[in-house]
Amino acid sequence: MSNSKRIASIDWMRGFVMILMVLDHVAMVYNADHLSTDSAAKYMTGTALPAFEFFSRWITHLCAPVFVFLAGTALAISVERKVARGINSWQIDKDILIRGAFIALLDPTIISFFSGKLTIQVLYAIGVAMMCMAFFRRLSSTLLIIVALSWIAFGELLVTLNWPPVEGSGSIIQALLYSTYSSANVSIVYPLLPWLAMMILGWVFGRYLLDYREGKANITPVQLLLGLGFSALLAFIIIRYLNGYGNMLLYRDDNSWQQWLHVSKYPPSASFTFLELGVMSIILGFMIYIEPIIGVRQNGVLLVFGQTSMMFYLVHRLILTGSGTYGGLRDITDLNMSYLITLVFLILLYPFCLWYRGFKSRHKDSVWLKYL
């Protein structure tokens, strides 16, 4: 691992999923055959899952868990360093609360405007989960792991008490916390509690990275990530094989690879969480392993995208969503063209993100730029 304050591998991982995120958002807006069956509330048993369409959607499921987990990791590293420097505890809490509130409010304001309806998605989940960390940061890593795993293991019991959420009915409060809600004017698909569990795990990992650098942990990050990654995948396989509790009511219809990977994202099931965090851990472990071998290119694509992830998200999301909502471009093409459009977006986004990273570094004292 590098001795620099930023860990390039984390930026690489974030940049990698940002690329996948563009594909997902392009397909959501422009692909007329886009699959959206990753919830027991939307999937009808026997519905076809065409291989190319399904894989293109499934691979992008990695985005939100990585984004949330690494947001927790980055926040932990930042906050724990402030604590070590003796910065006032209330000042640290205030910074966390303001940053979290700023991110959370982007969904019901600017994202919702471009969507044409009230849209509560990943920025809400990240922002409010971040605000919760102002309290949870005071707990030991052991307690934090227990809290996170308890939700992953038992959250389904609470969710299924009020299932399924019928279109236009149900509780918005429940949807904000652990379920989903959908109507003509409101869409809530990222409830707080399951995503908070992932952020908590990311926070614990951030603490571990600091401990490892200070010689307080013996196991290496690569060993830890690979061990946890394969363990999580084993848990996924067991849950999916048993085809019962842990799948948030989205069960396998058969033994096809599509059905094995057809897990519930809305809301996240235990099988979804273990699968995505397991895949993330293995990829991140590999990136950390190769970082000292191949070195870090300061203008590398993954690094640039990873270091400007929030601005990257807002720019591409608003352009795509706005063009569909107000430009009449929704469902205009197929998946093949969606891949091409994604490539064009990425080519255009790279120089913009490169410029923005430089602009932000030249204005380090800006109150608002630090949130983007």
Image (tube, rainbow, N blue to C red):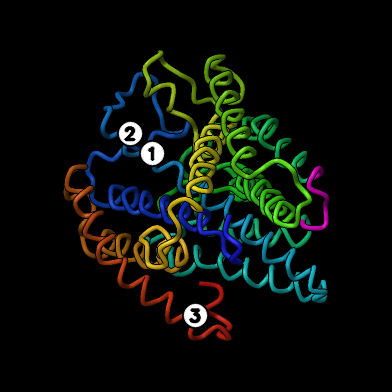
In the picture, measured across the screen, residue 192 lies left or right of residue 339, that is right
In the picture, measured across the screen, residue 205 lies left or right of residue 163, that is right
| Of pointers 1 and 3, the one earlier in the residue sequence | 1
Q: Which residue is mark 1?
A: 59
Q: Nearer the viewer, mark 1 or mark 3?
A: 3
In the picture, measured across the screen, residue 365 lies left or right of residue 316, that is right
| Of pointers 3 and 2, the one earlier in the residue sequence | 2
**For residue 240: magenta?**
no
Residue occupying the point 22% across, 64% down: 327
Q: CA distance from mark 3 to mark 2?
A: 38 Å
Q: Nearer the viewer, mark 3 or mark 2?
A: 3
Residue type at mark 3 is Ser
Q: Which residue is mark 3?
A: 361
Magenta segment boundaries in residue numbering: 137-143
For mark 3, give the secondary structure: helix
Mark linked to residue 55? 2
At label 1, counting other C-alpha atoms closer than 10 Å, the crowd grade (few under 14, some 14-19, many 20 or more) is: some
| Residue 16 locus on image (x, y percent) | 41, 51
For mark 1, give the secondary structure: helix
Residue type at mark 2 is Phe
Give the answer, above or below, for where 364 lies relative to 12: below
Are the residues tagged 2 and 1 within 8 Å (C-beta)? yes
